[in-house]
Image: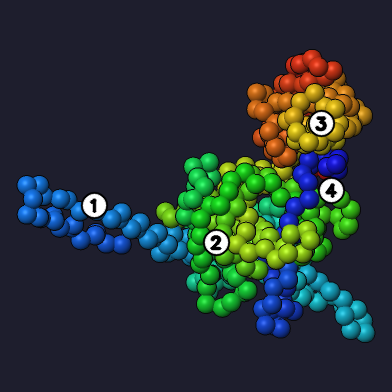
Amino acid sequence: MTPSTRGGQPMRPRVRHLGLALALVLAGCTALFGGQPAPTPTMRSNSLYAAQATAAPAAPAAPDIRTAAQRVSPAVVQITNQQEVTTGQFRQPIPETAGIGSGVIYDPSGLILTNNHVIQGASAIVVALPDGRTFQGRLLGADPQTDLAVVKVDASGLPVAALGDSNSLAVGDWVVAIGNALALSGGPTVTAGIVSALNRAVQSPPPESTTATPGPGGGQAAGPYLFDLIQTDAPINPGNSGGPLTDLQGNVVGINTLIAVSTPSGTPVEGIGFATSINVAKNIADQLVATGHAVHAYLGIEYVPLNPALAARLGAPSQRGAYITGVDAASPAARAGLQQGDVILAINGQQIQNESDLARIINQFRPGDTITLTVQRDGQRLSLQATLAQQPGT
């Protein structure tokens, strides 16, 4: 049986943040943490008819990676996370590099998008541009729930990357990943691949560790579920955390966040990376700049995502939806009249079809928004109204 969870996701592949620990940099950067086709000739014969040879399909034009790289790379920065450690006989605090990641300048005032895990715990943030300039960064705000943060540098004449629209992406589109892979000198690393999938939901590793087994089943506590992720096979390496994923025109469509390293059983995985969609990142960044924090909506239920086999085992009245296993006291769900054993079929007309739909849909709303839940209870279909609250801890 699928274990009960607030996030509603079953066990996921092991995933890894993309930051880079300095100790391992020094040890060798080992990662923890076309033209036109020729015209086809007409074939002639001695018969009364001339036969036209079938033209071979034209080879697809190679993607123009250079344009995206040239437009965006100057705005991709290296972020060094410095933390104070006490050492020596008198236990004096000294700064030490705890990790190195990436970020992207998205506003001429010096605003930089990156990952929360890149700057988490930093006592000082050092931002280095590809042109050689270095600045002290100031953290404006961070959101562990989406693993995003905004850092500001006070400087002028900064290169800026354009933010695109991740909703315009389709599976199979070419994308370009740019970041400070392995903290190599000489500027950002550029790799390319395709959009392998959209709207992925993956549970992130815990912030204190570089690897974790996602999912609600025991073991080391993992981080929050991340939603609306872009899956790509563009090579993404340690040090890329916080760097941009762009389309071929150089518009930022995502923030590189995670790579999958193995299945839950330990089988190695290759070619699976995840970026937070830029539409999610823009919303969170606006909140962080304005208030220093981001808020998230809260319904207040525990549930298991249904599939036909689980529905038959539970005796649930529907084969798709979210089967409620618990309702938090005094929560929006409780006030709306939701009960254990109810099956949520849809929210505002959006059907609950898979494991991540309910939490993903809730994430589209803000605290104070009222939603309509389509619920099945004892064979009857009900329509309930719930006013969402602010998620505790956000």
Q: Secondary structure at mark 2?
A: loop
Q: Residues within 10 Å of mark 1 (few under 14, many from 20)?
A: few
At horizontal 77% and vertical 44% (from top left) the residue drawn is 9
Q: Nearer the viewer, residue 236 or 56?
A: 56
**Most extreme residue toward the front, as rendered?**
47
Under mark 3, the amino acid is Ala
Q: How far separated are the C-alphas under marks 2 and 3?
A: 40 Å
Q: How far separated are the C-alphas under marks 1 and 3?
A: 55 Å
Q: Which residue is mark 1?
A: 54
At horizontal 44% and vertical 59% (from top left) the residue drawn is 68
Q: How far separated are the C-alphas under marks 2 and 1?
A: 36 Å
Residue 69, position in %: x, y? 45, 63
Under mark 4, the amino acid is Pro
Q: Are marks 4 and 2 in contact (CB under 8 Å)?
A: no
Q: Which residue is mark 3?
A: 312
User: Upstream in the sequence, badge 4 or badge 3?
Assistant: 4
Under mark 1, the amino acid is Thr
